[in-house]
Image (tube, grey):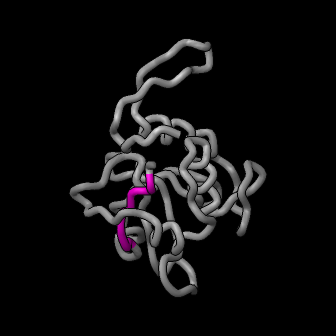
Amino acid sequence: VESRGLGDVYKRQDYEGTYATSTLAEDIIAHSYTYLGTPYRYGGTSYSGIDCSGFTMKVFAKFGISLPHGASDQYALSTHVTTAERAPGDLVFFVGTYDTTGVSHVGIYVGDGMMLHCGDPIQYSNLNTSYWQSHFYAYGRPPYN
């Protein structure tokens, strides 16, 4: 996989066999949409049932980006960015969403204060709600090389 950044424009082959320019973030988000409506299943990693870190792991794997299966482990592997630096395609991490220590939930930031994440089912959520604000921990950029 070539080294590229989140916003770098690159050429990719589309489904009709032609080439188009795109950013990696656009492609990551477009692929994450294919999981919308997938039911939650703890430890799951497929369209029949998936958990939050399984969702992000599978989406990024499609683009040759290896993430571990665990929200805390994904946080540890990512480059931490501020809210001002966040960009579509970054990961967003939360604590205290269930009884565990450390990072307990992860989603994909899609822009405009929204994320895609594995609720039950995979869905969009507004990060500006009191629930998500009270559990927000950090944004992270996965290793893109």
Q: Position of residue 88 (x, y in %)?
A: 37, 46
Q: Residue at x 26, y 63 (%)?
A: 82
Does the magenta segment cover residue 58? no
Numbered-mark total? 0
Is 112 drawn above or below residue 126 in the view shown? above
Determine the image quadrant of residue 92.
bottom left
* Residue plotted at (56% across, 85% down): 100
Which residue occupies the extreme front position in the image?
2
- 52 relative to 137 in the view: left or right: right
Residue range highlighted in magenta: 136-143
Residue 86 quadrant: bottom left
In front: 120, or 87? 87
Q: Main secondary structure of the magenta part?
A: strand
Residue 138, placed above or below residue 115: below
| Residue 43 position within the rendered picture, expressed as x and y whole percent measured from the top left | 72, 67
The residue at the far left in this view is 84
> Residue 7: horizontal and vertical position, in percent?
33, 39
Residue found 56% across the figure and 20% down from its top: 14
Q: Residue furthest right?
A: 48
Q: At which x and y percent is residue 42? A: 71, 69
Question: In the image, what residue occupies the spot 56% across and 80% down?
Answer: 98
